[in-house]
Amino acid sequence: AAGVIQSPRHLIKEKRETATLKCYPIPRHDTVYWYQQGPGQDPQFLISFYEKMQSDKGSIPDRFSAQQFSDYHSELNMSSLELGDSALYFCASSLNVRAGSNEQFFGPGTRLTVL
Amino acid sequence: KQEVTQIPAALSVPEGENLVLNCSFTDSAIYNLQWFRQDPGKGLTSLLLIQSSQREQTSGRLNASLDKSSGRSTLYIAASQPGDSATYLCAVYPGGGNKLTFGTGTQLKVEL
C-alpha cells in the first residue's frame, strides 16, 4: 500500500539559509499535517491543511510557512534557519474526520541539520 | 491545554516478560487515541488506534485499552521480544480538532 512520501530524507543547511521540505500524502487523503521532533523530544504539531486551506496551527515559528497544493501535496518552507531548527520533521496525512476516520499516517520524516 | 504523560519513561525487561505501558491525559474530551512505535532516529509506526467509542483494540501481541473518564490508556505487550525494543508514544486526538498531542514516550529495552 502507498504510504506518505517525504523528500528529501536528509538535509544539511547553514544558519540563515532557507529550506523546503516536501510531503506527498497517501492517495485520496485530503488532510496533511506537519510535526517537528527535536532531539530527545516528542513530536510537536506545527500546522495542518485540509483541501488546500490551513485548518489548524500549532507552535510554528513565523519564519516558517507552509501550503497545500491542488494535488494535495504540501511544502514546508523554512527561512532564516537557526541551529535550534535542527530536528526530524514529519508529515502525516489522513482523510477528513467527516469521512469517518481521521487516523493520521506518518511519513518517514526529513532530518534537517543546521550548521 | 492537553498534557499527555507516559510512565515509566524507561523500562528494561528480560525477554518473554509481559509488560504494561501507561499513558495519561489531562483533558478527557478526546476523539481518538493512537499508540506509535519509534526506533532511534526513525519514523513513527502506528500500532493501534482506539476510537473514543471503543474500550480496547488488539493486534497480535499488543492490546491497548482506553478509559476516557479517568484519562488513561494502557498498552499491553505480551511475551516481549528483543525486536520490541523501541520508544513507544501515545498520542491523543482532540475533540473538535485534528492536531495530535504526543506523550513523553516510554523507552523500552527487551534483553536476551
Image: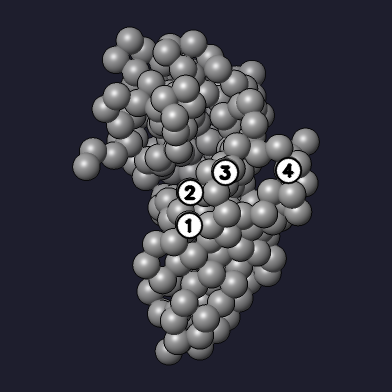
Which residue, given by chain and number where applicable, does mark 1 sit on?
B57
Mark closest to the chain's N terminus, 2 or 1: 2
Outermost residue, left direction? A1
Q: Are marks 2 and 1 in contact (CB under 8 Å)?
A: yes
Pinpoint the chain carrying mark 4. B
Q: Are marks 3 and 2 on the same chain?
A: yes
Mark closest to the chain's N terminus, 4 or 2: 4
Q: Residue at x 47, y 22 (%)?
A: A98
Pinpoint the chain carrying mark 1. B
Q: Amino acid type of disc 1?
A: Gln
Inspect this view and state whether residue B30 appears. yes
Mark 3, other Cα within 10 Å: few <14 / some 14–19 / many ≥20: few
Q: Quadrant of residue A6?
A: top left
Q: Amino acid type of disc 4?
A: Ser
The color scheme shown is one colour
Which residue, given by chain and number where applicable, does mark 2 sit on?
B49
> Considering only vertical position in the picture, is B110 above or below B21?
below
State the residue in front, A99 or B26. A99
